[in-house]
Amino acid sequence: MVGLVLAAAALAGEASPWFQGHHSRARLVAGGADGAARLAAIEIALDRGFKTYWRHPGESGLPPAFDWSASENVAMAEVLWPAPTRFEDAGGVSYGYANGVVFPVRFTRGDPGKPVRLVLKLDYGVCKDICIPAHAELALAPSDRDAAPERALIEEAMARVPKPTPLRANQVFAINNVEPNQGIRDQLVLTAYTPKGAAPRLFVEAPEGWYFGDAEPMKLINGADYAFGTYIVRILERPRELPAKIELRLTLVADHAAIETTALLDTAALAR
């Protein structure tokens, strides 16, 4: 497939101009101070009916890739991922964002006394019936102002970023347990608490060499102010030689709220 290229020169301001691609536009925006760090964001706008992908795209799709290596006076740039939506179509099950997405970015300066120039090479998929790869080269020289015109846009996106939550947290929104489904090869069972009345969706990410199927909600039991859910996840691929433990990243979405939990899975308990 042919990639589409967008390009932008470095600008002194709070947002780069939009650049048009295949049913999409992309830009960088500045967000002002965030404690010791500063905020920016990557905004991808898509035509109605099109989607792009999360870091774990599911059975098909192209996850976004961010290259900040040409930036000036940037010690660290961390892209934050808003909670995804689950899609199911002829290509299978995928995870991503419909009609557009804003990725918040936290960055720090190498030298606090010098200006910053953010330079981003961005690769992402633009998908409807087929997926077309797009490439954007964007740059921005954010000012030192504490506030920025696009701050509200970034804060809205940050509210959709899953909140780090430990396993078995004592609250009505938490992942309770993850373990092999006893007696069934290559299958996990997970349990979680979610707010009552929400429509939960669980996303499971595994290390390289492992591939998990879609988390299937099996049972939802309502309590006074919460629901207790059970999910089944199939292990579709795994290494021949298993490590003693693997770390899973679990994202649980319940309507407009989301949490992220890491959990260690003891592979000795998996049926051989």
Image (cartoon, rainbow, N blue to C red):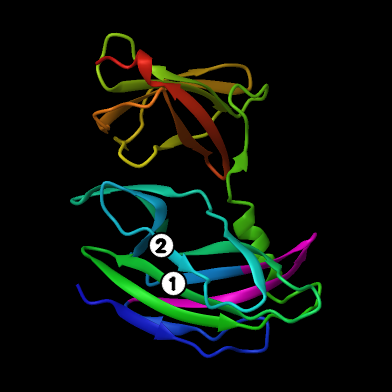
Q: Which mark is residue 122?
A: 1
SS under mark 2? loop
In percent of width and height, residue 217 lies at: 38, 27
The amino acid type, in three-letter code, at marker 2 is: Pro
Per the rendered image, the range of residues in magenta is 23-40
| Pointer 1 local density, CA inside 10 Å: few below 14, some 14–19, many at least 20 | some
Question: Going 45% across and 81% down the picture, which residue do you hit?
Answer: 137
Q: Earlier in the sequence, mark 2 or mark 1?
A: 2
213 displayed left or right of 25: left
SS under mark 1? strand
In which quarter of the view is residue 41 placed?
Answer: bottom right
Q: Which mark is residue 64?
A: 2
Question: Going 55% across and 34% down the picture, which residue do you hit?
Answer: 261
Q: Is residue 28 magenta?
A: yes
Question: Going 37% across and 27% down the picture, which residue do you hit?
Answer: 243
Q: Nearer the viewer, residue 105 or 97?
A: 105
242 displayed left or right of 195: left
The amino acid type, in three-letter code, at marker 1 is: Leu
Farthest residue, direction top: 183
